[in-house]
Amino acid sequence: MPYFFKFVLRYGILYGQAYAASPNFEGVTIWLPSQYAKMTPELMDKAGVEELYSQLGEDVIVRIRPVDEFVQAKHEQHISAPHWYLAFIGIDPDFQGAGIASKLIKPMLEEFAKSSLPCYLETNTKKNVAIYEHYGLRLLEEFKVPLVDLPFYAMLKN
């Protein structure tokens, strides 16, 4: 997982906004403008995907790819207009429940509202739906990724 987080952070810094709750990094979000939400091979190469691939191994990459493609197709189905995409949120387990999510999400949503751009995200945790609804996102669809039976919840804030 550290290699995955390192890659996502690099991608977010290169193409979007990486936002931390404080200098202590209790939590981090990666927000991508819609034109970078689809991670193309060229964009991923610039963010150092080869290091990630070498650590995960080909068998893991082969299993992840169909899930990523299915979720990406749902993303494109739900919103085609310019928007911000919450690609990642991570909170140190020692700080979960301490209001870090609010410090990560609220200021960014306020910033995006100034430019009248919607925000889109997926979560695969049912309890997170209520958290995101608290910030004004609405549930668009609950879907399962075929073959892995993994639930996802697509959400949007206009």
Image (cartoon, grey):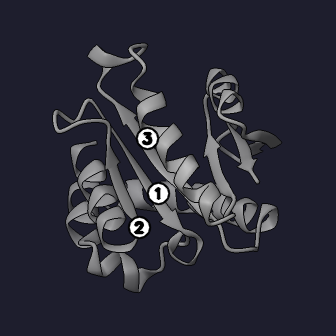
Residue at 69% across, 46% down: 147
Farthest-out residue, left: 24
Task: State whether residue 29 is above or below residue 62.
Answer: above
When asked about the image quadrant of residue 155, the answer is top right
Query: Which disc number belongs to residue 16?
Result: 2
- Residue closer to the observer: 137 or 114: 114
Earlier in the chain: of badge 1 and badge 2, it is: 2
Q: How far apart are labels 2 and 3 at the CA level?
A: 14 Å
Farthest-out residue, front: 114
Q: Label 3's element?
A: strand
When asked about the image quadrant of residue 75, the answer is bottom right
Earlier in the chain: of badge 2 and badge 3, it is: 2
Q: Which residue is under mark 3?
A: 89
Seen in the image, is 68 located left or right of residue 101?
A: right
Q: Which residue is under mark 1?
A: 31
Q: Say whether marks 1 and 2 touch (CB < 8 Å).
A: yes
Q: How far apart are labels 1 and 2 at the CA level?
A: 6 Å
